[in-house]
Image (tube, rainbow, N blue to C red):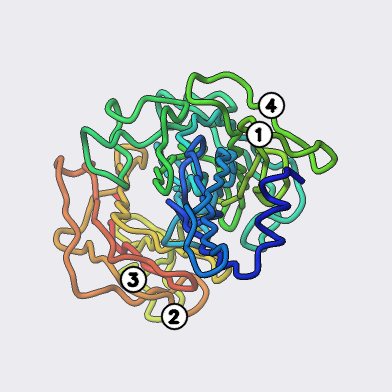
Amino acid sequence: MTSKLKFLVAASTISVALMSSNSAYAVGTLTGTDILNQATVNYNVGAVPQTAETASDTFKVDRKVIFTVAEAATTGTTSVVPGQQNAVTRFQVDNDSNDTLDFDLAVAQLAGGTAEHGGTDNLDVQICTTPVSCTPGVQYFVDNQSSGTIGVYDAGIDTATTIDNLAPDDDIFVFVIGDIALTAPSGAVAGVTLTGTAKNDDGSAITAATDSDANTSAEQTIFADAGRDGIESDGDDYTVTAADLTVTKLSRVVSDGVSVTNPKAIPGAVVEYCIVVSNAGTATGTASSVVVSDDLATLTDVTYVASSGKIDGTVVSGSTCTPGTTNASYTGGANGIVSGTLTDIAPGETRTLVFQVTID
C-alpha cells in the first residue's frame, strides 16, 4: 500500500466514485478491445476539500472462439430418387465468437450405423458424370454471398471449400452435394457429416489457452465451443424414394371362330395380350411417365386388331384383364408397335396395356 493511499484511508471523510469507459465482460465485445476502469477518490482535510486522486486499470478483452455447425432448415432427411444428381443437404456455420475467423471444412460419409434422422446408413452417395457413370465420393461448397442466390446451391458459382473471414455474429451456408446411384433401392439411407475447424483469419491454426493457464494482461484465446476444441460438426442424411416396378405379360385366347367355350389358339383365333405394370406396396415412390411399348415385329404370324389397344386397365384374375378406356397408340402396319403412357402408379397400384392380335 503506498503512503499516499495510506494517508487517504486515514482521512476522516472519504468518498469513492467508480467510472468505466466500457462495461467489463460486455457480451460480444471484440477481442483486443481495451477496457478502461478509473477510480476517483474525493476527500477533505478538516473542512477543506482536497484535490481528488484517481487511479485506473486497463486490460484487453480476450478472444472467445465459439461457433456452431448445424443442419440448416428445413431439417429432416433429404428425399432423393435413383439417378438424381447434385442432391443437396444444407448446413449453416454460425460464428458467435468475438473475432473474425476462417473455418476449414471436411465432409465424411457414415459407414453403417444410425443416420442423423434415425434410418440405418446403408448407402454411399457418389460423384457422377452421368447417372450410370459414378465414383464413390461427396462434395461440399460454401455459399457465395456476393453472387447467386444466398441459401441456394448455385452450381459453378458456389465453388469455395473453406470459409474465409467470417465476421463475429455472422453465419454462412455450406452445401453438401451427392449423386445417387441409379440402382439405389427404395428406402436406402446415406448419412453425411460436415465438420468445421476454427482458424485464425489468415488460415493458420489457433493456439488457445487452457483452463490451467494463468490469466495474463496479454490477449489470450479460449475455446468456448461445445467440445472446447475449436471443432464442431453435425450430420444429415439422404433417403431414397423409389418405385419398385414389376412387369408381367399375360395372354389368353378370346375366340377361335369354332369353340364357344375354351377357344383354342388356331389360325383365325383372337389372342389378347395384357402387359401388367405393378408398383410394390413396400415402395416409397410413385412411378411417373411410365411408357409401355410392345413391338409386334417380335411376334410371328399375328396381325394387330385395329383399335384394340387400351391403357390403364386392371387385372381381373389369372390372365384376364379389363381394358381401360384410354386408347393406346399403334404405328407401323401389321407388325408395328403398340404403346401407351400409363397414369402414375403409386405404391400398391397396378396399370395395364391391353391389345389383341389375330393368328394368321
Mark 2: give few (<14), some (14-19) or many (20+) Cα within 10 Å. few
- Residue type for callout 4: Thr
Instruction: First in sequence, mark 2 or 1: give its number.
Output: 1
Q: Can residue 242 be seen in this view?
A: no
Q: Can residue 329 be seen in this view?
A: yes
Q: Residue at x 42, y 60 (%)?
A: 73
Mark 4: give few (<14), some (14-19) or many (20+) Cα within 10 Å. few
Residue matched to label 3 = 255
Residue matched to label 2 = 316
Mark 3 or mark 1, whichever is nearer to me = 1
Instruction: First in sequence, mark 2 or 4: give its number.
Output: 4
Mark 1: give few (<14), some (14-19) or many (20+) Cα within 10 Å. few
Q: Quadrant of residue 260?
A: bottom left
Mark 2 or mark 3, whichever is nearer to me = 2
> What's the mark number on residue 207?
4
| SS label for mark 1 | loop
- Residue type for callout 2: Val
Q: Distance between the residues labelled 4 and 1?
A: 17 Å
Residue matched to label 1 = 217
Query: Do callouts 3 and 1 mark residues in contact (Cβ within 8 Å)?
Result: no
Q: How far apart are marks 2 and 3 (CA)?
A: 18 Å
| SS label for mark 4 | loop
Instruction: First in sequence, mark 3 or 1: give its number.
Output: 1
Image location (x, y in percent) of residue 50: 49, 57
Instruction: First in sequence, mark 4 or 1: give its number.
Output: 4
Query: Do callouts 3 and 4 mark residues in contact (Cβ within 8 Å)?
Result: no
| SS label for mark 3 | strand
- Residue type for callout 1: Ser
Mark 2 or mark 4, whichever is nearer to me = 4
